[in-house]
Image (cartoon, rainbow, N blue to C red):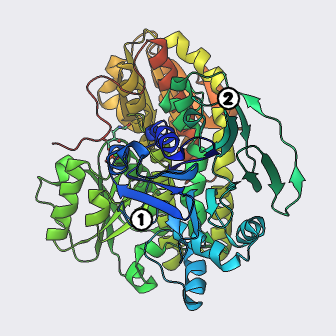
C-alpha cells in the first residue's frame, strides 16, 4: 500500500521526507514524490521507479529548499505506475498539494462532476480528484475545505495536505487508512506508519477515523469531521525498526494474514453497489456474459488453488462449465479453446512466466482473457484483455495469504455476477450471498484471534514427516492450499488428496501417528468425509478436522476439531483456510524456518 510522510518545523523538509519514505519502502511501491513550500510557492518532484531516482533528481532534497513538505511512495491502484500518476498531486493552480493512501471509491462520480465544472485532469488517479475537490471547496479556510471533502468522498484515505496561502500549517486526515503524527525536535511529522518517524520521535498520536490534524512548527491540533476540537493522548512506541516495518508482528506473513479482513473488504466493497455486483472492469454486457459457454482458468501455485475452488462455485452457482489447468501444463499441451470460452488467468504478482505465457497462448487462439491480478500495471495486467484487480495491497511474504483470500473474493464476485445474469440466482438469493460475503472479514478476524489454539496444536507436530490433507469438492481445493502452505514454509512433506481417492493407493502410507487434516465444510459430503476419517483413523492416523460450527458428529471420527463460523457453502474456503495458514505458520516458526523467505522460493516466478 502507499506510504505518506509530512514535516513542518525548523529544519529542511526534503531530506526528512526522503528519509521517512525510505523507511516505508518495505510496503511496496512503484513511484515516489515530494512537494515542499519554498517560501513563495510549492515545488514538487515525482517520478516512476525507486526512491533512489527521486533522491538523485533532488540531490538528496537540496533542490527543494523549505521547511514544510509532504512525500509519498505509491502502490498503484487507479492508473498504472508513471510519473504523472505519482503523488503528490496539485490542484489547478498548484496552490494546494496532496498525498493520499487508500482508495476513493466514488472518485469517478466526483471526477465527472468536477470536469463538468471545468476542472482538467492530468492523471488517472483517484487522488487528483481529492486535490481538485479541495480546490472546489476552498475559500480561504483550509479546515473547512477538508471537512467538506470528507463529507463527499467514499472509501479509504489518509491525506497529507499543504495550502500555499497557509504555509505555516500542515493538514492531515484519516479514514480507514493508517495515519500517525508526532512531535519532533523543532517540528512536527505525519506518516502512514511508525518506521518513518522512529528516527525523530517515539511518542506518536494514532489518528482515528474521520479525525483531522492541523499542525504548525510548534502546535498540533485535532478536530472531528464537524470541526470540533478534540484532545488526544500520545502513545510511546518501543518497537525496533525491524519490528515496526512488520507493524509489530514477528513476520510479514503473520502481518499479512491479519490484513486479510481488509484485503477481503477492499476487494468486494467497490464492487457491491445497492445490492448489485458491479464489476465495471469486466467490460462485458449481460449479453456477453450469457454468451459464455465455458470458463478456462489458468494459474500457478496458490492462484491455481483458488481456480480449483472457483470451479465448484461457478459450476454449482452459475451452472457454467469450468476447466482449471496449471499454466505450466496449459502452455505446452496445445490447448483447445472452443468459441465462447472465457479464459481467466489468476496471478498475485502479474509476472509469473508460465501464467503470462498461458495468457499469450490463449489470445493467439482467439480467446478473450480476463486477468485477476494484485499488482497494478504488471505484465499480466497490461496484456490481459480486461483486468479485475484484487485490492490486497503489496504482499511481501513469499507464501501468499491475503492475496489468495482476495483472489477468492474476486472469483466469488464473478460467479455471483454470472449466476445472476444467467438467471441461476435470483434477487433474494443474491441478497443472502452478499450478506454472507460482508460477514467474512469479521469471521476471518475471529478465526485469526483464535491463533493460540492452533499454535498449541502445531507445536505437537514440529517433527512430523508426512502430513496429509483430505477433502471433497471445495474442501479438496482448501486441502491443496493448506498442504502447500505447510510444505513451502516448514519444509515438511505434505500432500493433499481428494478424500475419495485415498483408497486408490495413498492410504497405504497411513501409519500410526500420521497426521491427517480433514476439511469438511460441505454439508452434503459430511457423511462421506466422516467415513474417510474413520478409514484413516482405524489405520493409526491422528485426525485433525476443520469443519462448520455445529457439526459435532465429526467428533466421533476426529482427534482434534477446529470449528469455523457459519457461512454459505460457496464461501467456506475463505474461512477454513485461516486455521490451515496458521497451522503451517506456527509449525514453520517452531522449526526455526525463515517464514517470510523460505529456502529455494521466490515471491514471483518470472522464469520457467
Ligand atoms: C504460494 O504461497 C506461492 N507463493 C506460489 O505458489 C504462488 O502462488 C505462485 O507462484 C503463483 O504466483 P502469482 O500468483 O504471483 O502468479
- Is 190 placed above or below 145 here? above
* Residue 565 seen in render: no
Image point (89%, 58%), residue name = 228
* Residue 372 found in image quarter: bottom left
Counting from the top left corner in percent of width and height, residue 319 is at: 44, 68
The label on residue 85 is 1
- Disc 1 crowd rating (10 Å Cα; few below 14, some 14-19, many 20+) is many
Do tag 1 and tag 2 residues touch (Cβ < 8 Å)?
Answer: no
Asked if residue 209 is positioned above or below residue 461 in the image, the reply reads below
Q: Label 1 to label 2, Cα distance in Å? A: 41 Å
Tag 1 secondary structure: loop
Q: Is mark 1 within 8 Å of ligand 1?
A: no
Q: Nearer the viewer, residue 544 or 606?
A: 606
Across and down, in percent, residue 128 comes to: 52, 70
Q: Is residue 207 left or right of residue 444?
A: right
Residue, x 63% and y 26% (percent of image)?
451
The one nearer the camera, 402 or 468, is 402
Kindly identify which numbered label has been placed on residue 450.
2
Amino acid at each position: 500500500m502507499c506510504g505518506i510522510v509530512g514535516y513542518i518545523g525548523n529544519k529542511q523538509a526534503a531530506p526528512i521526507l526522503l528519509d521517512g519514505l525510505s523507511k516505508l519502502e518495505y510496503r511496496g511501491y512503484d513511484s515516489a514524490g515530494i512537494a515542499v513550500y519554498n517560501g513563495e510557492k510549492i515545488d514538487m518532484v515525482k517520478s516512476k521507479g525507486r526512491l533512489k531516482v527521486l533522491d538523485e533528481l533532488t540531490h538528496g532534497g537540496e533542490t527543494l529548499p523549505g521547511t514544510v513538505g509532504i512525500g509519498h511512495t505509491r502502490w498503484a491502484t487507479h492508473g498504472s505506475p508513471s510519473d504523472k500518476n505519482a503523488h503528490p498531486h496539485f490542484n489547478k493552480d498548484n496552490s494546494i498539494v496532496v498525498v493520499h493512501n487508500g482508495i476513493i471509491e466514488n472518485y469517478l462520480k466526483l471526477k465527472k462532476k468536477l470536469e463538468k465544472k471545468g476542472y482538467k485532469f492530468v492523471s488517472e488517479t483517484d487522488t487528483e480528484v481529492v486535490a481538485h475537490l479541495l480546490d472546489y471547496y476552498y475559500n480561504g479556510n483550509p479546515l473547512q475545505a477538508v471537512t467538506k471533502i470528507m463529507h463527499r468522498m467514499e472509501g479509504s484515505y489518509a491525506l497529507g495536505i499543504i495550502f500555499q496561502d497557509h504555509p505555516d500549517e500542515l493538514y492531515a486526515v484519516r479514514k480507514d487508512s493508517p495515519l500517525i503524527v508526532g512531535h519532533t525536535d523543532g517540528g512536527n511529522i505525519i506518516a502512514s506508519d511508525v518506521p518513518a518517524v522512529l528516527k525523530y520521535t517515539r511518542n506518536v498520536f494514532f489518528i482515528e477515523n474521520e479525525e483531522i490534524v492541523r499542525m504548525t512548527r510548534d502546535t498540533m491540533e485535532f478536530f472531528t469531521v464537524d470541526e470540533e476540537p478534540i484532545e488526544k493522548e500520545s502513545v510511546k512506541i518501543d518497537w525496533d525498526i525491524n519490528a515496526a516495518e512488520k507493524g509489530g508482528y514477528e513476520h510479514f506473513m503473520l502481518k499479512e494474514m491479519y490484513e486479510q479482513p481488509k484485503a477481503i473488504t477492499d476487494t468486494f466493497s467497490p464492487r457491491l453497489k445497492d445490492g448489485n455486483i458491479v464489476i465495471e472492469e469486466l467490460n462485458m454486457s449481460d449479453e456477453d456474459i450469457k454468451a459464455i459457454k465455458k470458463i478456462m482458468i489458468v494459474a500457478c501455485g496458490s492462484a491455481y488453488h483458488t481456480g480449483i475452488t472457483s470451479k465448484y462455485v461457478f459450476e454449482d452457482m452459475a451452472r457454467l462449465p469450468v476447466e482449471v489447468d496449471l499454466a505450466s501444463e496449459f502452455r505446452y499441451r496445445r490447448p483447445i479453446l472452443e468459441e465462447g470460452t472465457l479464459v481467466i488467468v489468476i496471478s498475485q504478482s502479474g509476472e509469473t512466466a508460465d501464467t503470462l505465457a498461458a495468457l499469450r497462448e490463449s489470445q493467439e487462439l482467439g480467446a478473450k482473457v480476463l486477468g485477476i491480478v494484485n499488482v497494478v500495471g504488471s505484465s499480466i495486467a497490461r496484456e490481459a484483455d480486461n483486468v479485475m484487480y484484487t485490492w490486497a495491497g503489496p504482499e511481501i511474504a513469499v507464501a501468499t495469504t491475503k492475496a489468495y483470500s482476495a483472489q477468492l473474493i474476486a472469483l466469488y464476485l464473478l460467479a455471483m455476477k454470472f449466476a445472476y445474469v444467467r438467471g441461476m440466482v435470483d434477487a433474494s438469493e443474491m441478497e443472502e450471498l452478499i450478506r454472507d460475503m460482508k460477514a467474512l472479514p469479521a469471521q476471518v478476524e475471529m478465526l485469526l484471534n483464535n491463533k493460540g489454539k492452533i499454535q498449541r496444536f502445531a507445536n505437537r507436530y514440529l517433527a512430523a514427516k508426512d502430513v496429509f490433507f483430505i477433502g471433497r469438492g471445495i474442501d479438496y481445493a482448501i486441502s491443496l492450499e493448506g498442504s502447500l502452505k505447510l510444505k513451502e514454509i516448514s519444509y515438511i512433506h505434505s500432500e493433499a488428496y481428494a478424500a475419495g481417492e485415498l483408497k486408490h493407493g495413498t492410504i497405504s502410507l497411513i501409519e500410526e501417528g500420521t497426521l491427517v487434516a480433514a476439511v469438511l465444510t460441505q454439508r452434503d459430503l459430511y457423511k462421506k468425509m466422516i467415513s474417510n476419517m474413520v478409514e484413516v483413523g482405524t489405520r493409526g492416523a491422528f485426525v485433525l478436522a476443520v469443519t462448520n460450527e455445529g457439526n459435532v458428529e465429526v467428533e466421533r471420527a476426529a482427534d482434534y476439531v477446529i470449528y469455523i463460523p457459519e457461512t454459505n457453502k460457496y464461501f467456506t474456503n475463505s474461512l477454513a483456510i485461516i486455521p490451515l495458514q496458521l497451522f503451517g505458520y506456527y509449525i514453520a516458526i517452531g522449526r526455526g524456518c525463515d517464514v517470510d523467505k523460505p529456502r529455494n522460493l521466490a515471491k514471483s516466478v518470472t522464469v520457467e
